[in-house]
Amino acid sequence: MIEVEVIGLDDGVVDELTALDVEELCMLAFSSAGIEDGHVAVAFVDEQTIQTLNRDHRGKDAPTDVLSFPIDGVDGDAPAQRANGAPRELGDVVICPPCTEDLSEAVVHGALHLTGMDHEVDDGEMLALQAELLRWVQE
């Protein structure tokens, strides 16, 4: 089972998404990669917070729309649970609503990065899958 922890959504920053929407978008992205178990945190933050994260982790001193931080990995050999019985940590997705045109797209984009996809090195596969998943949601 995918456990989705949503942080900062109830701070009045996001009007168009509910925690249930975020959970469903994450589950859709993970299931597209065959990932059925794990924990992910999705945090909604302000521009200053995401700029700091972007600077500290990517060397880019500017705000951005979404950042993903994988933790336990998602390869076929990764156990669905940790030794203590807790679900594996898929990672964290951090989204800055003021820098994001489409929050649903940002959630799916961040979750797909946690599956190991990377649009900066693939041949358009990640962005094509992202578009397909979002079409399913919008129908």
Image (cartoon, rainbow, N blue to C red):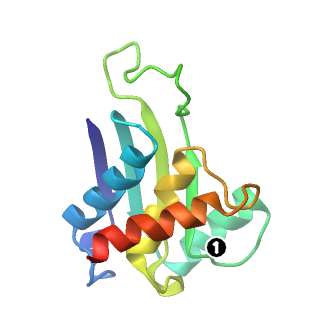
| Mark 1 Cα shell of 10 Å, populated few (<14), some (14-19), many (≥20) | some
User: Which residue is at a point 51% across and 54% down the rendered structure image?
Assistant: 112
Q: Is residue 17 above or below residue 2?
A: below
Residue 94 sits above or below residue 117 on the image: below
Q: In x, y percent, where is residue 91? A: 49, 44
Percent x, y for residue 63? 64, 78
Dividing the picture into quarters, in which one does residue 1 lie?
top left
Say which of 40 and 126 sits in front. 126
Instruction: Point out the residue furthest to the right here.
Output: 59
Which percent across, then down, holds residue 47?
55, 80
The residue singled out by tag 1 in the image is: 51
Q: Is residue 43 left or right of residue 91?
A: left
Q: Nearer the viewer, residue 17 or 56?
A: 17
Q: Secondary structure at mark 1?
A: helix
Within the image, what quadrant is residue 39 found in? Answer: top left
Point 39% across, 71% down: residue? 134
Q: Nearer the viewer, residue 20 or 130?
A: 130
137 left or right of 48 in image: left
Q: Residue at x 27, y 83 (%)?
A: 16
Q: Amino acid at mark 1?
A: Gln
